[in-house]
Image (cartoon, coloured by chain):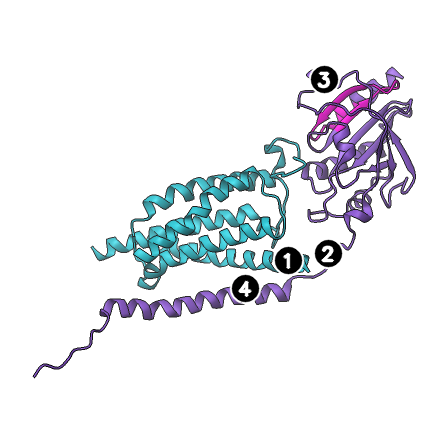
Chain colours: A cyan, B purple
Amino acid sequence: MLFVLTAVVDRTLALLALVAVGISVVCLVALVRGRVPSALRDHALALATAVAVVATGGSLYFSEVAHYLPCVLCWYQRIAMYPLVVVVGVAALRRDLQVWRTVLPLTVIGAGISSWHVAVEQWPSLGAGVCDATAPCTILWVNEFGFLTIPTMALIGFVTISLLVLVAARGTEDRA
Amino acid sequence: MNATKRKRPPAKGRAAQSSRTPMILVGVGVVVLAVLIAMMTVSGSGSSVTVEELAGSPQVQSDPLPPFEGDPASDTALGQPAPEVTGQGIDGSANAGQDVTIGATGQPQLLVFLASWCPHCQAELPELVDWLDAGNLPDNVELTAVVTGLDATRPNWPPNDWLEREGYTGPTIVDDADGTIAQTYGMSGTPFWVAIDGNGQVVARAAGQLPMQQVQALADALAQQS
């Protein structure tokens, strides 16, 4: 039963990661063109909060319910992602459009660690060359659609949140 | 004539509340849709083999080696007697269910500790199989695969299917769920190599994927010492 539930959760999170990729593309195009649709701008912080909540909830499900052991790189990514639930959530409630100044350092660091973790998964020789018996960073706990692993989805989350807070900030310039 | 005016929320607040509701509904709808698609597309089949069914019950007859610290040159286990461990071959292997002894057997041995979920082991095994199939293992040297790190929640389970898929037909010994053999030999991670001479003494330990030239050198050195 847990196996099936975990498989459904894995697939659901992967599908939501693909949705986040779509949102990121829309944000990137809007930022590059310099024209942000008001609907996107007005809900950007709420969307960013939702991404952080889903990423945090998924991470906790993997470790606490599915018993996937987080390795050291997982912990560093958690340190970057978990606070975003509160930081971006409070900013969304207060409509603090300048929250990008607080969020970007966390998301950039988190994305960097995620990128390294993805590289270690793809090329295990980049790491220690040995599998830690307890919590190896090379193990592919999730591998949906052939490329969506846990650090890949985390990377997508960090990038999406970064772009959304920038879109929200862009709104202050449009209103100026 | 003063009519009592009802206080209405500011227009901006009402607009924000009314625009938030559709967005929340869209968000919930996306999540529900993702869950439904996931439920319809995942397969419920996983391996029914449990760790308890596959794990061995190794018996350790002598003192364990100190943990491997990472440097083969300064390994404190060198020259120490290899722990004598008796166990069983893993299901499906050449010596499945048979009693297997590693350690002081009177014959030079190479032990390779493998975990099926370990990407480095997954890279090592095919190379090892090719090396063995080419007849590179000296006749007087035994090579035994120690199947350890048993965990049904990790990828590439069960390990016996993996060994069969990769074409490994040599002797095996399966660890228990607690990794007793791995701990006894001071394994620091997988893959893990231990070379034992004909007198039952440890002559080398190494962690990580080894090139087959290095494995050949170890095997040749053991063959010459017997």
- What's the residue type where badge 4 is placed? Ala
Relative depth, front residue between A62 and B125: A62
Instruction: Kindly report the distance in space between the C-alpha atoms of the residues bearing marks 1 and 4.
Output: 13 Å
Give the labeled residue for mark 1. A7
Nearer to us of marks 2 and 3 is: 3
Decide if residue A25 is in sight here.
no
Indicate which disc residue B76 carries.
3
- What's the residue type where badge 1 is placed? Ala
Give the labeled residue for mark 4. B34
Instruction: Kindly report the distance in space between the C-alpha atoms of the residues bearing marks 3 and 1.
Output: 45 Å
Chain name for mark 4: B
Taking the spot 52% from the left edge, 50% from the top edge, the residue there is: A153
Instruction: Kindly report the distance in space between the C-alpha atoms of the residues bearing marks 2 and 3.
Output: 43 Å
- What's the residue type where badge 2 is placed? Gly
Indicate which disc residue B46 carries.
2
Looking at the rendered structure, whether the residues under marks 3 and 1 are on a common chain is answered as: no
- What's the residue type where badge 3 is placed? Thr
Which span of residues is magenta-colored? B193-216
Secondary structure type for disc 4: helix
Q: Residues within 10 Å of mark 1 (few under 14, many from 20)?
A: many
The image quadrant that residue B208 belongs to is top right
Chain name for mark 2: B
